[in-house]
Image (cartoon, helix red, strand yellow):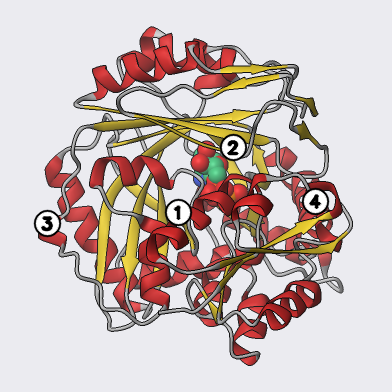
Amino acid sequence: MFKKILIANRGEIALRIICACKELGIPTVAVYSEADRDCLHVRFADEALCVGPARSSDSYLNIPSIIAAAEVTNVDAIHPGYGYLAESSYFAEVCETCGIKFIGPGPSAIKLMGDKAEARKTMHEAGLPIIPGTGVLEEDIDEPEEDLAEIRRQADRIGFPLIIKAVAGGGGRGMRIVQEAEQLASSLSTARQEAKGAFGDSSVYMERYLENPRHIEFQILADQYGKVIHLGERECSIQRRHQKLVEESPSPVMDEQTRRSLGKQIVQAVSAIGYENAGTMEFLRDDKGDFYFIEMNTRVQVEHPVTEMVTGVDIVKEQIQIAAGKKMEARQKNVALLGHAIECRVNAESSTTFAPCPGRITAYHAPGGPGVRVDSLAYADYVVTPYYDSMIAKLIAHGANRQEALHRINRALDMFVLEGIETSIDLHKRIINHPEFQAGRFGTSFLDGVLKL
Ligand code: ADP
């Protein structure tokens, strides 16, 4: 087992990793920015090092600083949590070169799945259904007209509406819906510019746009000895701006037979690429009930707790043990989804515009009671700064069935005291109590289509 782990992240996920390390008896090193001296991950880790100024690029994402901290504290592994470093094949490679185990898949798997067009192709070849679309749209600077004519032909083949997506996209950014052929040329050039600005890579591809689909994803675990299992699905259709807001497991529309057959296909596909560690296979489900692979996330997800609550598997502990070379003991036939879990992401943001609302938390009390879990960085007097992600807490409720989970999350939202800043708690109450949500009838357009936000 590892002797010491550095956590290259902040906030609730850094705390979550500390929980797993404490239970495994592994000392931890926290890193923090100058703005985060008073953060709980600094307090609960065994050692803590300041890695730079507030801006993420100068501290948390500053690879030389992170590696220097790891060398100074003599750790043998780094857990990147979720986010940029977790998805950086370069960072994973640097860790490897420095003889530090990156807790996650190898650099080549991160690279392959980080290219969404390549990921589509690979998973299609491995037997998974994908949405009709294209590979990377090459940009021929010398013959722009010919180029565009070919792209138009491909678009006509896919049909409208379609969506242009950044190959390097993530976090719900880098997507542009094209309603009709006339918009194609201008949307393409805007999408390329946006992709270049956001991800430093202007490569894009096209896919058919599904109207109000469901986003359903499978959690997988794979050890170093070729064993792959899945932990069932998560329903993540409640989104704002293509970013998840509420997640649950199981999905209200999944039946046991589909879970088993799709799960088997997924395990085969993941085995085919020789994947190691935790990962998530994301799908869209159309109104006919057909599933299409859209991307793989090669890291722990924000919404992993709902899976933990229904399966009883500690995903972060599994990640660490797999990285340390331990054989996975869990067997697919013993994985069962018991009861139902729902998670609300509590963000410091406006419930109407979704703009971040930083500020001082004046009063804080996290709800407890049976079946309630809160993963949070917050406390009374904590100042939410504008530098980082606006998520300040994840509220998760588990019940014997969906009905009980809904009652629990509802009363927990009522008992969540978080004052001084605007949060998404009230929006969550609206979502959870909406008759269509309660009935399990919703898709990715719920917020704009049903709540008119
Ligand atoms: P990211 O990597 O940025 O999270 P994804 O490819 O996972 O992007 O897509 C995020 C969300 O965008 C999906 O959950 C869905 O709501 C929407 N989306 C993506 N592709 C399509 C599509 N082809 N049709 C309809 N909605 C889509």
Q: Secondary structure at mark 1?
A: loop
For image coordinates 49% across by 13% down, the residue present is 415
* The N terminus: image quadrant: bottom left
Looking at marks 2 and 3 on the same chain, the residue that comes earlier in the sequence is marked by 2
Q: Position of residue 248 (x, y in %)?
A: 36, 34
> Separation of disc 2 and disc 3 at Cα?
34 Å
Q: Residues within 10 Å of mark 1 (few under 14, many from 20)?
A: some
For image coordinates 60% across by 63% down, the residue present is 46
Q: Secondary structure at mark 3?
A: helix
State the mark number for residue 242: 2
For image coordinates 59% across by 38% down, the residue present is 243
> Separation of disc 2 and disc 1 at Cα?
20 Å
Assess whether mark 3 and mark 2 are in contact (beta carbons under 8 angstroms): no
Residue bearing mark 3? 334
- In the rendered structure, the answer to whether residue 289 lies left or right of residue 322 reads left
State the mark number for residue 194: 4
- Location of residue 107 with respect to 287 vertically, above or below: below
* The C terminus: image quadrant: top right
In this view, the mark in front (4 or 1) = 4
Q: Residues within 10 Å of mark 4 (few under 14, many from 20)?
A: some
